[in-house]
Image (cartoon, rainbow, N blue to C red):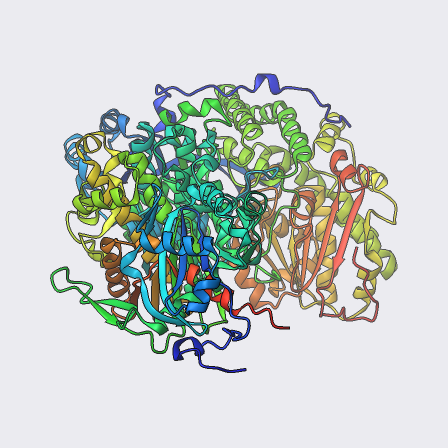
Amino acid sequence: MAECVRVDSSTSTHTMDKSITLPPDEIFRNLENAKRFAIDIGGSLTKLAYYSTVQHKVAKVRSFEHNTKEAASDKLYEISVQEEVTARLHFIKFENAYIETCLDFIKDHLVNTETKVIKATGGGAHKFKELIERKLGLKVDKEDEMTCLIKGCNFVLRNIPHEAFVYAKHADSEFRFQTTHPDIFPYLLVNIGSGVSIVKVESEDKFERIGGSSIGGGTFWGLGALLTKTKRFDELLQLASKGQHTSVDMLVKDIYGGSYGSLGLTGDLIASSFGKSATADKEFSKEDMAKSLLHMISNDIGQLACLYAKLHNLSRVYFGGFFIRGHPVTMHTITYSINFFTKGEVQALFLRHEGYLGAIGAFLKGAEEDNPNQYSWGENYAGSSGLMSVSPDMNPMQRARSGTFDMLEMDRLERQLVNLPLLQDPSSYIPDTVDLTEDALAREYWLYCFEEALDGVVKRAVASQPDIPEATERAEKFRQKYRHKLQTLRHQPFAYGSLTVRSLLDTREHCLNEFNFPDPYSKIKQRENDVALKYYQKAVKSLEELSWEQRQFALVRGVLAGNVFDWGAKAVSDVLESDPEFGFEEAKRQLEERPWLVDSYDQWLERLKGPPHKCALFFVDNSGVDIILGVMPFVRELLSRGTEVVLASNSGPALNDVTNGELQILTERIAAMDPVIQAGLREDRLTLVQSGSSSPCLDLSRLDKVLAMVVRERQTDLVIIEGMGRAIHTNYYAMLSCESLKMAVIKNSWLADRLGGKLFSVVFKYEVPAGKPSQDSAALTPS
Amino acid sequence: MDFSLGAAVFYFHPLKCSVKLNRSFPWFGMDIGGTLVKLVYFEPVDITAEEEQEEVENLKSIRRYLTSNVAYGKTGVRDVHLELRNLTMCGRTGNLHFIRFPTQAMPRFIQMGRDKNFSSLHTTLCATGGGAYKFENDFRTMADLELLKLDELDCLIHGLLFVDRVGFNGHPECYYFQNPSDTQSCVKKPCTLDNPFPMLLVNIGSGVSILAVYSETNYKRVTGTSLGGGTFLGLCCLLTGCETFEEALEMASKGDSTNVDKLVKDIYGGDYERFGLQGSAVASSFGHMMSKDKRDSISKEDLARATLVTITNNIGSIARMCAVNEKIERVVFVGNFLRINTVSTKLLAYAMDFWSKGQLRALFLEHEGYFGAVGALMELLKTTEDP
């Protein structure tokens, strides 16, 4: 049971400046399959968007035909790796200076495209029109800038869970990501380009420019250049971040000698911007003037935004445009201004992919026939650069960043994802239990933990493809990629939204997929399923011999013991790897004795004495012992009680979690042995659905649309969530509108410590939503 | 204890005067702002021979000094054209004089107060504006004078309503612009604030305060902005090297802001029809200045004009939003930023009219920046020593 030992590895985590000579297969990826293009050319940056298809390997399972000879083999099903083609959106951002080089590159690699036009937006589209048409041989088709911006904004808000954030300069984590409200409308978008446009967005197609101001980024830049003789926007911001505005601005205390108490105006408030510079006999430093100018413009924009928000009764206000674009200095001053003018009632929101909105929108305009808005999309962590801090002062190496390529990739998801209808309050639901962006100690532990586990993952990946010689090389590439991601996250924990155990796990899955390791655990899962299935009947029989009350307890212990078998948890994978005989009985012995760390078993038992549930939705976890000897008998009991069961398993592989494909086969096999399960299937009282996810964790706000439909149709009144990833790392605090049962064994001693338990402590959390009394009389004490 | 005060003053019942305890002269009201000190002085013209005899020498000399000069020291100015003649206040008839000097000259003013032995006069110096607080101690220690400090917004409203009531020597105090959208036919028209409430009062001094006024005593400060007269002058000084407001305005009157500002048509080639923006609208103030070529080709006059237009439009925009939010249709602009500044008054009139599609009307007052000082003087007359 190896424990993670802390080793200081931070010395080796220097992020090097990326030069312009990035390997081309990493910049314009999948260009050969590019189908559609769009370009957004701003004042200094170009954003290119293209839609492409990606061919990658997926693991499929297929039941052996019973009548073939192969059936004699002791394997349950065969695993095959197939090529699958999926759709991906690529977005690349680079400096306008590289536009010609990039166009040449694209030209050379564009082989398969049939497209004749390129959608273009942004102020620079006009300027580069001729160049693009000449280089690419595509006709430039201009799209309205604001329309593109709004379309892009809707797209990211809808598809990227942690898109919006609040900026807090002095907080432990500068970026506080927001859960996007399921209904993203209405909102106010304040776009601060050279001027300011204030747009009210009411629906996908309905938006209106309700106001604006001529005092914007161009004013800062233009006036700043005149006042300080500094030409570049970035340099002006840098000057501003070093200046003292109080030598230039007339403050309330300069007029009053102190505060203006009766109006609640503090002495430090600016009464008159540049009010002290109305004198000929004084010199002012560039820094001070730049700072004063920055305050003047930020405050003014903030004030107008607040007035418009108030007038139109809008509380969600997003800020974008080149004035904002990730600059901590301007995000801070705008945030300050909004807080001041609304007394905290409205929060200034910023967007992680703000710079891409125009390009995304232009692309969507051109891709309407592909109906991109009918699909769900997911950010591919493997291919996206993530958000960087661009403060020149906070991170000196960022100076070079503008010269590098920034990327965003969005994968089209197979399934359309929606909220679980049983969430108590979808707008406040946060899947993750610990936000590692805010919790520095936890962050440090988990980053370290994932780094430590990397060798094992690489080994596992190689072992999963024994017949493919270049697997080692690919696995090595995977190692580099994921390690680099971990290092990036160490410096910029906010790079992909809130950093969580889930996002670390998902990033790892994305990276594995990227290097064609679609399911490194497929063989292990297969073996374990085979073995466990042999014990199924015996397990069921021994349960049936117990009294009702004994059986209920044994079933719960079975689910918990089964859940000890988990390759995702380091402490366990060590044991499993060294001692394959570690059996189900052994696992039961390892389990904590009652009272458990979180223990509402008594309430659960009381509830079982009452009438059966109408329908239970069960989010399952691992293959093998877990699903077969733990979950299935439990399901069997529910069915026997007259409760319908919906088993939700992952759509795609993640660690040794059972996938929907595998579970289909397993359930059939079990049905062949067990009349209860068989009847359940036959009578449609046992249903298998896919979750829509390929993560070891669970985001109840992004679930398969079919699942949501089934849940609603069957009037589900019990949700069971099993396993550390789904019930502890995520959803531990999730509030549901029906009864819920969260069961897990803590297989990580750090986490156990955190929760006040020890290794193999048990969490058994049965909850009844407030206002819905449990059907028996037993009062529940919240665990 | 009602008595005849003259209709105008009588209207304000808070203004209670005592016949017996006639406030002793001199009568001053003072508003010490961030940039300018505004001083109003009531010169009694109904002094009886008896009074004349009793009048102490330095009081006489103050009166003579103030009324026989139009400039004081290097920077003090009496706005003779604003003088309100034969005004009745607190039972006395006299002329109200309007004097201003830079706040920077405050130390010299206090010095003068000491030299003239002001403290020996049995009067209270009523002062408002931030400087009443800032310089209170200096008045006390240097000139042995106790200030009666008054809230500047109270004074502003009282003073404004008073002056509007008494009128401007037989003419209305208030005016507006007819046809504000048409530079050819745009003309200044006098009017009265017959039924003044509610009004949105926009006071543009160094900074800007915006008040929603529902009655003489019921008002709230809606918001303010730090982009005000001080910003115009401060930026102009930095950009053009000018030194005074007059100089800055003079330059602005000759400049062309479209050389400095980026217009909608500079970006879109014409109107931005998708959003109904005219090509001539400013898209980005100082937007052309992002380019070095343009920076090298503009004049100081252009810069002054652009600064003026930027600040004015911004105030107009915020005022308009406040008016809509507060549901008030009448927007009254005051403050010394508007002094000799027809570029701004016309621009504000236009902005209110154009953006509200004629719903809002901008009103202006002749005594622009002096209402706080007048309000302070009224407090003096109201302050009665009666038990």
**Residue A97 shown left or right of residue A523 in the figure:** left
**Residue A350 shown left or right of residue A700 in the figure:** left
Viewer-nearest residue: A174 or A238: A238
Residue A115 percent coordinates (x, y): 21, 41
Q: Residue at x 23, y 33 (%)?
A: B291
Q: Residue at x 78, y 33 (%)?
A: A582
Q: Residue at x 66, y 30 (%)?
A: A444
Residue A448 percent coordinates (x, y): 65, 27
- In this view, A341 is above or below A753: below
Viewer-nearest residue: A104 or A396: A396
What number of labels is visible? Answer: 0
Residue A572 percent coordinates (x, y): 73, 33
Residue A311, by quadrant, is bottom left
Residue A551 percent coordinates (x, y): 84, 56
Residue A683, by quadrant, is bottom right
- In this view, A452 is above or below A428: above
Viewer-nearest residue: A496 or A647: A496
Which quarter of the rendered picture does the C terminus of chain A lie within?
bottom right
- In this view, A773 is above or below A694: below
In the image as oriented, which residue stretches furthest toward the left? B184
In the image as oriented, which residue stretches furthest toward the top? A12
Viewer-nearest residue: A751 or A495: A495
Which quarter of the rendered picture does the N terminus of chain A lie within?
top right
- In this view, A403 is above or below A53: above
Confirm whether residue B84 shows in the render: yes
**Residue B144 shown left or right of residue B352 in the figure:** right
Confirm whether residue A376 shows in the render: no
